[in-house]
Every structure is written in structure tokens, then in C-alpha cells.
Image (cartoon, rainbow, N blue to C red):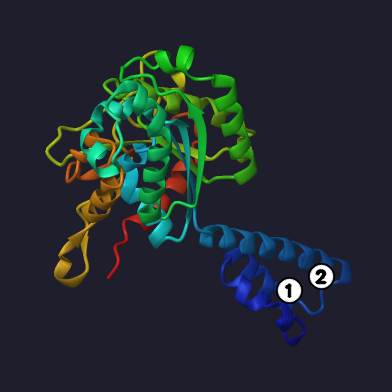
Amino acid sequence: MAEWSGIGLQNLSRRFDPARDLLRLYYSQYNMKQTERLRLLITLILLLATAEAMAQNAARPPKVLVVMAHPDDESMMSVTLYKIAREQHGRVDLFVITNGEAGYKYSTLAEQFYGVKLTDEKDGRSRLPALRKRELKNAGRILGVSNYYFADQRDNKFCLDEKASLDSCWNLPVVKAKLLKMLKDNHYDFVFSVLPEEAEHGAHKAATLVALNIVAMLPASQRPVILGGYVTKDTDSIIRFPGYKDYAETKVLNDTALYQVDRNASFSYNNRLNYKVITNWEIAEHKTQGATQMTMNEGDKEAFWVFSQNDPSSTNQCDALFKTLAITPK
């Protein structure tokens, strides 16, 4: 077997049972005809190449894109993003559709902090886009975000109607073109968005609908797995989500969450820490958004639903991801 030691066939074969068996057969059949021996060798090499590719894919950290309406929506899945970026050494990018300027109403305390007028609509709408981008990047530094992409669309006002954003506020062709290019260029494994639940902000629902539509436009072999996230409390009754209205693309594989990340998971000395520390740090950076600040310490789980438009085998990828996210540091 010395003739093959230079390329490590023995070590590779341990990862893939059919390759191991073929390798044994190859070295046991010294009297095999040369053509048959060559055919067996080619089959073996192909199997080993497949095994190596599988091993590399399994070891590669995940690449995740979050598609969100406002520069603080990542807070709803902050622990999940932190664990992917900081603990699993994966890549987390944010695609933010609006500038979040409608949040001027909640900026009372931030006026003192920044020393500028923000609660007047004219002042708030002119100053908040730059401030909120800065706050998002401060929050992203905590989570480990790699890249930020801003579509710079108008944030009109709070409402529950997704059509207000889709039909009048946003330049939808521009948003879709930017998102499609990002997905094609970066080859993400997963796309996260906010679950378009009935009572959710209309712009959140609109952002998720855009994400679902653009992911579906990609060739099947290039589509990331797309999930909807939602923060739950341990005291909540079971949350069921069959889909939103008559949008077929929002149908899910299971009406209850298939995956959860526990903000209360404890670790460190005497298990005195949990991941709510990260959530609170991250939320604290969004100082212009008083309503967001009021959610500190709320929410126990970050729950995720898998949309039905994904390939049925996508749950295998999700199983592997969330299995690693369940691990806590020592």
C-alpha cells in the first residue's frame, strides 16, 4: 500500500464505508485483469472525491443572510446570529430594506444622548437614517456581523398591512434586484426573516415576502434554506403558524416551530450567565428606539419555522445547524 500513501487513500476511506470496502477489494485482487483493476480504481477515486467534498461541506461554517425591514429587526434573532458568528465562526450578513426613519416617535431619550432633535418628524426623518445605521453596526459588532447591505427605502409608519410597503413605499424592482444579486454573489446556506405572523409589523411581513419570492427565483441547486423567526416566551401557549393569508409562499412544513434557540441556556462559572446578556447588549445599542429598549429581558426562545417552498431535504441542513447551536460554551 506504500504506492498510495502519498495521497492518503487509507485516511480518506475511513470517512466513507463504500470507499473503504472498495479499497480493500482493490488491494486484495492482485490477479484481477488490468482493465477491471483500472475500472475499480476509477470508481474508488470518484467515491473518495465525493467523501472528501462531503467532509468539507460538513465542516464549513454556515453562511447566513438576514433579510429585514428595519435597522433593529435582527434583535428578534440576536442569540441565533451571535452563536452562528461568534461560536460557530460562520458568516452573518444583514440586508436592511428601510432606513427606519419612522422610528422618530420613540427617540425621546435619544435626543439627550445624541444632543439633536429627533422627535419632530422633519428632524427625525432627516437625522435617523444615519444614526440608525450607526446603531446597527454597533449592535452588529456584538453579534459578529460581517457585512451590511442597505436598500435605503422609505420607512413610512407602523401598520399591519404589508401592501403599504410593497405597493407604495418601496421601490420594489430596486430592492429585488439588489437582493437577487446578493444571493447569487454570496451563495448563502440560509436566509432568515421575520415570521409573517398576522399581528406582525406590515413592513416585517413585506420584507419576508420579498425574501421568499427572490429565493424562489434562484435555480433549485443554488437556493439557500429560508426560515421565519419569532421570539416566544416560556409562558406562551403553543404558537401555530400555518401561513399568512392567501400568500402561498408563506406556507410552512409544520405549523409549530421545528427549531428553537434558548436565550435562557446557562453557562460560565456556576452557570451564572445566559444568552439574554447578549440580547440586552445588542438591544442597548439601538438607543433611538425606545420601544425596542423596552423589550430587554423579554423573550425566552428564538423559534424558527421552515417554509414549504424549501426542498424537502432542507430539514437535514437545519437539523445540523440547530444541533450545533444547542451547544453552550464551557
Residue 128 placement (x, y as % from top left): 37, 33
Give the SS element for disc 2.
helix
Residue located at (34% from left, 32% from top): 254
How far separated are the C-alphas under marks 2 and 1? 7 Å
Q: Residues within 10 Å of mark 1 (few under 14, many from 20)?
A: some
The residue lying furthest to the bottom in this view is 2
Residue 17 placement (x, y as % from top left): 58, 66
Q: Name which residue type carries label 2.
A: Arg
CB atoms at circles 2 and 1 under 8 Å apart? yes
Q: Quadrant location of residue 255?
A: top left
Q: Quadrant location of residue 9?
A: bottom right
Q: Which mark is residue 37?
A: 2
Vertical placement of residue 262 versus 18, above or below: above
Q: Tell which circle, 2 or 1, labels the residue nearer the N-terminal end.
A: 1
Residue located at (57% from left, 72% from top): 14
Q: Which mark is residue 26?
A: 1
Residue 168 placement (x, y as % from top left): 47, 12
Screen quadrant of the N terminus: bottom right
Q: Name which residue type carries label 1.
A: Tyr
Q: Quadrant location of residue 109?
A: top left
Screen quadrant of the C terminus: bottom left
Vertical placement of residue 57 versus 10, above or below: above
